[in-house]
Image (cartoon, rainbow, N blue to C red):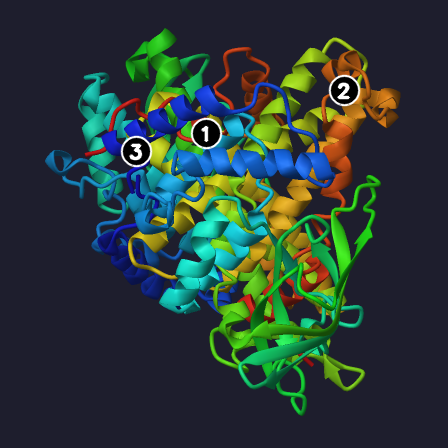
Amino acid sequence: MNFTFTEDQQMFAEAARSVLTAEVTSDRIRERWSTASGLDRSLLKQVQELGLPGMLVPEALGGLGLGQTDFVMMAQTCGYVACPEPIVEQVMVTAPLLVDVLDKGLGDGSVQTALDALQSGALVATGHPINPFINFSEQAEWFLLGHGEGLYLLPANAVTVKPSKSVDPSRRIAEVTFEATDAHCLAKGESGAALWRATLNRGALATAAQLVGLAQAMIDQSVRYTTDREQFGKAVGANQAVKHLLADVAVQIEYAKPVIYRAAYTAEISPTRADLAVSHAKVAAARAALLASRHCLQAHGAMGYTWECDLQIWVKRAWALAREWGDEGFHKNRIHEWLLRPNALLGPDLTFGRGSITDSVAA
Amino acid sequence: MDLRYTQEQIAFRDEVRSWLEANVPKTPLPSFDTAEGFEAHRAWERTLAQGNWGMVTWPEAFGGRGCDLLEWLIFEEEYYRAGAPLRVNQNGIFLLAPTLMEYGTEAQKARFIPAMAKGDEIWAQGWSEPNAGSDMAAIRCRAVRDGDDFVISGQKIWSTRAVYADWVFGLFRTDPASERHHGLSKILVPLNAEGITVRPIPQLNGLPGFAEIFFDEVRVPAFNLLGGEGEGWRIAMATAGFERGLMLRSPARFQQAAKRLVELYRSRSNEVLDPTIEDAVLRCYMDAEAYALSTYQTASLLCGGGSIGPEASCNKIFWSELDLLIHETAMKLLGARAEIEPQTAQEFVDLGTWLDGFMFAQSGPIYAGTNEIQRNIIAERMLGMPRK
């Protein structure tokens, strides 16, 4: 039993953090808002050179062969800097889905082609049926899409993209439709459903990690703002009422993080048992991020309600991500259904399942 | 990261479970805030000590098992799972003992720890004074050095367990010219010493769970000074992290309560319920799990030689508000009958101890530093917000 990250994991996360905090600034995020694609291609290139897209892809398939726990802190950092590019989805969701498909020997050569494209820095979009739209659809080269329980892989020219405007100017969402033909089908029936189930958990986990990163960034900005801003001859942040707004968020973040790390571990080691851990992570992270949005906007006073104030970048992302990959209702119902089962493993001795998450024993 | 128990940890859990199954009293003990219940709980402390289960993290020489913090978590999980009695000596074993281990002389450890382990000496705490509550540095109760003794005069209040306990530890002002957190010392005082008057204070449930202690020229040997003279504040703060904060309220307590809440909820799920209950039950389950996971994370960090930072101050708020939510939700599930204080066996079967727990939960956000003070600490020390 060891619930800490290794030195390697921390070093890797730190390296990614220094790149992302330097490259993804609020000024450059605002620049993206007025471009057609909304993407910073140079950032995607840098990320690709670091090997991030293939981080969770086995070495035999050209990746780094690492797991969800190796990337989860980086996903938090992507949230912390409010990175608009869908890096986390590429790494934690799309690449593992393509790998799953290859592992099962499904589909034709196009699966490998799409995975190679992803590892070369192209966007491969995953359209899980739970999400009504896909972010950056117009920039994606390949699509993994659902129809019923089926999983389909299509090139960009085979789908129809109908954009909507997101409240978050950094997002470019669109509904994607396609004709479900056998030619593009990778899996159907139970096989397709199983792939989508694992994908949903990875997507919810990826979103949860970003949400706590967003929440932490909102706190840090609010601490700076309320320290600098003075009223009645003293810093606004010296008032207990303001301190307590931010302390409440800090507590929620503190207790969401280990829940996310357990979910990452479970999704990596025992993916078929990850539903509960992942739903818990998504609910806890969304709660922290939505509380941060409300309290941090309040701590900024009228400034928080302006377009000029950078806080909006994080607040609006939290509003969007809180509902992506299953909203509160979906994830709470998954937990509720489990809690009502008479044989649910509940109680102080069962935090890690019966003996352990994997029912095996540590060395 | 490896969230699997080792063979040794699994074997340890089995050993704890078997012992508890054989030894935990079959019927609940009366409250330790009654004379009869206090002695029944003292007897349970002796039973634990006979099996060397009194405090598993202590060295074997002091009646412990030299366990690490992960094993301690496992012990606590089994302890609450088994429904074993609450620890009447929690002030001693969770609050005083870690400080004694760190700052006590060998002679002090030998004098106090075995007696604590055996239940022969049950401890009260003496932090607060009438004018030093949240503002603990305002302590005025003085201890004047006189040869080989200290002579103590003044008053303590809200001293938990002081009505029936044998000893009290607390902070006293040993330098009369000092102010605030300077010039304070940690001193151990027998409650049967001449000059001590203990006045019980009935709590919300009518039982004297705490007391006022009046010190009128109470003479104690300088041997009872823990750590250096004037070092009291630093000592009190130094061990304020994991050992004191988390050991006092281990996550298993809330996981067991959340489990009982889920069972209560399942038993009422066919009735017409307040629609907010479902959400509250889910949140109780999730937050109890989150508290456990966070504790495992901290224990792993400490076992690996790491240290904890100011984020530890989040835990008091989290568990006390969780405890409130668990019991408020249980009250909602019991409906109008929640008001009944169970007297008959049938009432206990129907209503359990939820009302008692609900009343106790009201104190959680107040004792050990109110949650308002905790939020200030988080804002200032963890987030770095301005003090003034």
Residues packed near mark 2 inside 10 Å, few (<14), some (14 to 19) or many (20 plus): many
Position of the C terminus of chain A, as image quadrant, is top left
Q: Secondary structure at mark 1?
A: helix
- For mark 3, what is the residue? B9
Q: Quadrant of residue B13?
A: top left
Q: Nearer the viewer, residue B217 or B127?
A: B217
Q: For this view, does B26 lie left or right of residue B327?
A: left
Q: Residue at x 38, y 24 (%)?
A: A198
Q: Residue at x 61, y 57 (%)?
A: B167
Q: Secondary structure at mark 3?
A: helix
Q: Position of residue A200 (x, y in %)?
A: 44, 27
Q: Nearer the viewer, residue B279 or B121?
A: B121
Disc 3 residue type (three-letter): Gln
Q: Position of residue A146 (x, y in %)?
A: 43, 20
Q: Which numbered marker is on residue B143?
A: none
Q: Secondary structure at mark 2?
A: helix
Q: Position of residue B226 (x, y in %)?
A: 50, 71
Disc 2 residue type (three-letter): Leu
Q: Nearer the viewer, residue A235 or B382?
A: B382
Q: Residue at x 23, y 42 (%)?
A: A54
- Confirm whether residue A123 shows in the render: no
Residues packed near mark 1 inside 10 Å, few (<14), some (14 to 19) or many (20 plus): many
Q: State yes or no: discs 1 and 3 in contact (Cβ < 8 Å).
A: no
Placement of A181 over or under B9, stated as above or below: above
Give the chain of mark 3.
B
Q: Which numbered marker is on residue B78?
A: 1
- For mark 2, what is the residue? B351
Q: Residue furthest front?
A: B194
Residues packed near mark 3 inside 10 Å, few (<14), some (14 to 19) or many (20 plus): some
Labels 1 and 3 share a subunit: yes
